[in-house]
Image (spheres, rainbow, N blue to C red):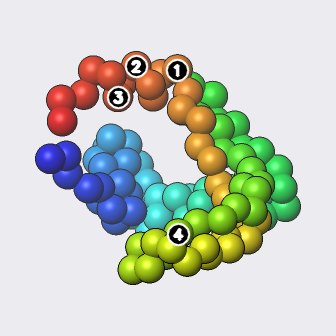
Amino acid sequence: MANTITKRELVNKICAELNGNLTQGDVLEVVQKAVELITSALGSGNRVVIRNFGTFAVKEVKAKVGRNPKNPTKDVPIPARKVVKFKVGKTLKEAAAKSSI
């Protein structure tokens, strides 16, 4: 099973890669600002493209009828909603293909 990397661990790794040229606080501020800007752009209906990494976009999922697992004979309406989709970029796709899980 692969390990999970938290935002704090990501900040620590970036600081180590930069040989201490930026403080953890500076890197944390940049990472947090990037997340906020991506969130804001998606909230405005825009796509966010990070070359070789991937594309974030908001897509509408149509309304549908589901089933209640506790009572499969009963229909449950599921309303239309918007969801965030992520399309993997070429470099990330290649890196994932080489990973050992």
Q: Which residue is mark 2?
A: 94
> Which label's residue is closer to the chain start, 4 or 1?
4
Residue drawn at x 47%, y 58% as measured from the top left: 27
Q: Nearer the viewer, residue 16 or 49?
A: 49
State which tag comes first along the sequence, 4 or 3.
4
Pinpoint residue 37: horizontal percent, then vertical percent.
Answer: 70, 59
Q: Quadrant of residue 18?
A: top left
Residue in the picture at 71% in, 47% down: 57
Nearest-to-viewer mark from 4 and 3: 4
| Residue, far left | 1
If you read the primary sequence from the N terminus, does the residue marked by circle 2 or circle 4 appear first? 4
Kindly give the residue lying farthest to the front in the view shown: 73
Question: Are there few (<14), some (14-19), or many (20+) residues within 10 Å of tag 3?
Answer: few
Q: What's the distance in space between the residues labelled 4 and 3, CA to CA?
A: 35 Å
Q: Which mark is residue 96?
A: 3
Upstream in sequence: badge 3 or badge 1? 1
Q: Look at 27% across and 21% down and name the residue there.
A: 98
